[in-house]
Amino acid sequence: MISPPAMTRFVVVAALLLLLLGSCNRREEPALTGRSGGEGQTVTLCHGSVTNILPRIALEQGYFKQEGLSVVIREMSDGKLAFDSMLKGECNFAVTGAPPIISTYPTVTTFTILATVMSDDDSARIIARRDRSITKPADLRGKRIGVKKGIIGHFFLDVFMMKHGLAPKDVTQVFLDTEQFKAALERGTIDGFSMTDKMVSAAARKLGANAIVFSEPGLSVIHGILTTRSDRLENLRAAPGLLRALLRARQYAHEHPAAAKALIARTANIPGTEIDDIWNRTTIELSLPNTLFIAMEDQYNWQVQRGFIPSTVQPPNYLNIVLPQYLAAIDPDLVTVIKH
């Protein structure tokens, strides 16, 4: 039988637990303010394409270290590979675009969106060979164009062709892995490919005068989305410090653009002319905007139409996989997403 003092202690503890549960989201186990819960923790951040501007600045300027984090940045050839590595537990965090998230959720629900670290409305582009009589968008008709199935380059090819009066069936879409594009274009087994600017620029340098690049600013916006495994407590404990370091990197990029550009050009081995182009078209911002989820629904509809994911009665509610509390605890003005 429980003694009165023990019963009193039990009631008090139970009441405190109920209060804590009532005031916290079920995923909000670590503290959201103060120093990083992962003091001295080593974390790996994977990214694809040119979504590493803020992480790279934070690393080079020592902002992660000042938050008690030892961060290793792993560069991957595209955002899907980065996202998949995070899901497998090979990375603690990943910066990816919307398509990998859309093709994964709601089948997989063990990840969460913490913030966006950039947006770019002119990153996806199409490169083609001039010696295949390609000088204008209409010349893509009947050609073999390489894409990686379901990612942003594939989406861009579809909407680019639609804008220029072409249907998906008007080209032969050749599905390739990221590492295969450049060699296939050089060999001529494809007439062109659609990918993000970093890969397109590298291929254009190789082809020289034989390359033609098509772009369409504003047609397809890429968001660099910071994600993590929501079932890994060590990731959630490191998240506040990671976000604070990225916010300091954002301030550095805004206050010292020339130095920030030089840093990224040096560490990413990007020519000066290309880094200027990236800077001019990229919004370098740590935020969690409501517009992100509108764009994700558009991407979802495209993937359903193309048959890449099964159709459902209505799109999934992507607000179910966002944790705005972490960024809002640092600066509520950075969060415009409304989650009920």
Image: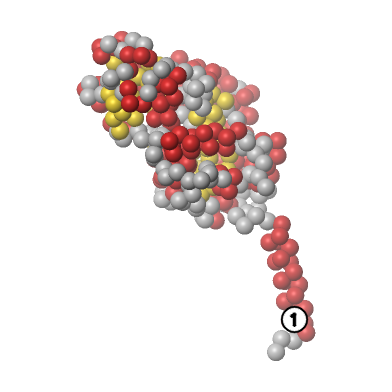
Q: Position of residue 321 (x, y in %)?
A: 56, 47
> Could you classify mark 1 by the number of other residues whose Cα lies within 10 Å: few (under 14), some (14-19), or many (20 or more)?
few
Q: Is label 1 in a helix, a strand or a loop?
A: helix
Residue at 29% x, 15% y is 129
Q: Nearer the viewer, residue 318 or 248?
A: 318
Determine the image quadrant of residue 160.
top left
- Location of residue 194 with respect to 132 vertically, above or below: below
Residue at 38% x, 20% y is 166
Q: Nearer the viewer, residue 222 or 28?
A: 222
Tag 1 residue = 7
Q: Amino acid at mark 1?
A: Met
Q: Position of residue 9 (x, y in %)?
A: 75, 76
Colouring mode (rainbow / by chain / secondary structure / one colour): secondary structure
Q: Position of residue 270 (x, y in %)?
A: 42, 22
- Location of residue 212 with respect to 14 vertically, above or below: above
Determine the image quadrant of residue 11.
bottom right
Residue 70 visible here: no
Q: How many marks?
A: 1
Residue at 30% x, 33% y is 175
Q: Quadrant of the N terminus?
A: bottom right
Q: Residue furthest front?
A: 313
Residue at 52% x, 34% y is 298
Q: Position of residue 105 (x, y in %)?
A: 48, 47
Q: Nearer the viewer, residue 38 or 298?
A: 298
Q: Nearer the viewer, residue 320 or 201?
A: 320
Q: In the visual, does 231 lie left or right of 187?
A: right
Residue 8 visible here: yes
